[in-house]
């Protein structure tokens, strides 16, 4: 059934592309935008009927009325659309944002590293590409940008047990970090390939993040490669700790009671660092079609490189069995989570279930058992995205709803905790991310 649904969505995608006037404007890319005083906000959306079509809209946030539900394509006087054939990106940095997959143009889910920006017509285009693997099964991967000259990403198709080091400004590779020796020492009996020679040990598919001179990279031991299954016998989440000066793996640490962090999609970043230097990990608990674990948030404290065993946000304890936290971010030294009001199963994650919604909560890390529900409407599930981003020193929150009549758009929270509606759009557009472009 799931394979049939994917084939159906792919077929519908081609019909949509043929019938819509969303332009793929890469030929206009030769004149890159340099003045970011206007048309500096970029909204990424997916068509509500399928998550295989991503459209970007450039606009001026101060010019929109948050009480109007905009039809983005038909209101081209306010929203300039473009379709550069990538998924919505993970991270933005200065005048760029970065995506880890193309999702159209004949190569569905083509893995690679794509850097996007705006041209002088205020349309999004791919300015650079790196590590493209057109004939490779799309694996989940993560991306980390430390500064303009240093970033990290995972490319299983080319080097399954290495993390690529690159220069985000020049978009060139600077080398790689080989985790295989440390993994072999940690797990001598690990299965490295199945009978079809599929890789069974993934590095960086769930987590790549940097904090206080250390790079943290997830290590996953699979039971079945095609579905990212982890054996029920595994009881921990594994994380390599790497010194960023030497690129040496210092150790592999584990958190008991979770197998995964986030989910196996490249768009969703399930780690966050607060202003004090604490690094947080959000586990949805899902193990694809195998047995799930309870959803939870855990951390590595500032100044340390081991998990803090005395601290946890226990989602099921506060919200009930089967509830999950699906997105995380730290803002103003608070933790914000997107949590389901009903049990949310993996098999129901890509379509709205009757009565199931996710709501938005603020936690104080000093008191992880205390929280407040934000005055924001609930949303549909959104497994391909992290609903949170920080723009203009405010926390922007995507509220994706496919059903007509429900709010669909963005809210924000400022440092005083005030909640504000920022943008409303018709339900045929599902918001996935917002960026603000600026100088490098």
Image (tube, rainbow, N blue to C red):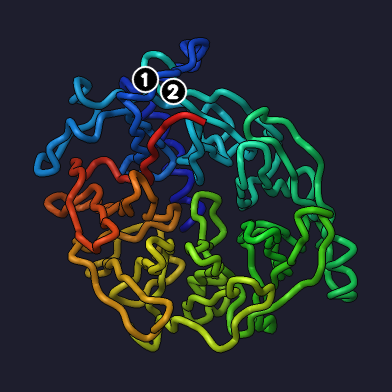
Q: Which mark is residue 108?
A: none
- For the point 67% across and 47% down, the residue is 153
The residue shown at (24%, 63%) is 417
Cα distance between the residues tagged 1 and 2: 5 Å
Residue 411 visible within the image: yes
**In the rendering, at what x and y percent does residue 312 appear?**
49, 83
Observer able to see residue 320: no
Q: Residues within 10 Å of mark 2 (few under 14, many from 20)?
A: many
Q: Nearer the viewer, residue 278 or 143?
A: 278
Disc 2 on helix, strand or loop? strand
Q: Nearer the viewer, residue 194 or 168?
A: 168
Residue 187, quarter of the rendered image: bottom right
Would you identify the image quadrant in which residue 259 lies?
A: bottom right
Q: Where residue 124 appears, x then y in whole percent?
A: 43, 25
- Place of residue 66 in the rendered image (x, y in percent of width and height, measured from the top left): 14, 42
Please determine whether, in this image, residue 176 is positioned above or below residue 174. below
Q: Residue under circle 2?
A: 118
Residue labelled with disc 1? 122
Foreground residue among 146 and 406: 146
Contact flag, marks 1 and 2 (Cβ < 8 Å) = yes
Other-residue count near label 1 (Cα within 10 Å), few / some / many at <14 / 14–19 / ≥20: many
Q: Is residue 332 left or right of residue 111?
A: left
């Amino acid at each position: 059934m799931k394979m049939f649904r994917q084939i159906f969505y792919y077929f519908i995608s081609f019909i949509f592309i043929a019938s819509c006037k969303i332009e793929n404007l890469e030929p206009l890319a030769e004149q890159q935008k340099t003045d970011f005083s206007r048309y500096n906000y970029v909204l990424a959306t997916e068509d509500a009927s399928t998550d295989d079509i991503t459209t970007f809209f450039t606009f001026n946030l101060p010019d929109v009325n948050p009480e109007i539900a905009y039809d983005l394509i038909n209101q081209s006087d306010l929203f300039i659309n473009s379709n550069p054939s990538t998924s919505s990106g993970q991270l933005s940095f200065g005048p760029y944002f970065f995506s880890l997959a193309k999702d159209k143009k004949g190569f569905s889910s083509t893995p690679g590293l794509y850097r996007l920006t705006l041209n002088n017509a205020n349309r999004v285009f791919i300015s650079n590409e790196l590590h493209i693997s057109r004939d490779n099964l799309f694996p989940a991967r993560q991306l980390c940008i430390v500064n303009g000259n240093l970033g990290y990403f995972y490319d299983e198709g080319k080097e399954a047990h290495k993390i690529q080091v690159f220069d985000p400004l020049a978009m060139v590779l600077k080398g790689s970090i080989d985790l295989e020796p440390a993994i072999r020492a940690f797990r001598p009996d690990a299965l490295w390939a199945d009978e079809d020679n599929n890789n069974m040990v993934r590095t960086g598919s769930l987590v790549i993040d940097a904090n206080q001179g250390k790079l943290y990279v997830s290590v996953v031991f699979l039971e079945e490669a095609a579905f990212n299954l982890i054996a029920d016998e595994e009881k921990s989440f594994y994380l390599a700790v790497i010194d960023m000066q030497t690129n040496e793996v210092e150790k592999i640490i584990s958190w008991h009671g979770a197998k995964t962090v986030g989910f196996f999609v490249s768009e969703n970043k399930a780690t966050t660092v607060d202003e004090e230097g604490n690094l947080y990990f959000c586990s949805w608990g899902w193990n694809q079609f195998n047995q799930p674990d309870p959803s939870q948030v855990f951390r590595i404290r500032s100044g340390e490189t081991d998990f803090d065993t005395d601290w946890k946000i226990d989602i099921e304890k506060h919200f009930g069995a089967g509830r999950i936290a699906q997105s995380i971010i730290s803002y103003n030294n608070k933790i914000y989570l997107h949590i389901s009001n009903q049990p949310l199963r993996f098999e129901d994650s890509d379509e709205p279930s009757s009565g199931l919604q996710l709501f938005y909560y603020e936690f104080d890390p000093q008191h992880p058992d205390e929280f407040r529900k934000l005055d924001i409407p609930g949303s549909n599930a959104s497994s391909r995205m992290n609903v949170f981003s920080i723009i203009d020193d405010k926390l922007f929150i995507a509220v994706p709803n496919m059903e007509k009549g429900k709010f669909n758009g963005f809210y924000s929270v400022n440092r005083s905790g005030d909640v504000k509606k920022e943008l409303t759009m018709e339900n045929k557009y599902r918001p996935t991310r917002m960026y603000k472009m600026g100088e490098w």
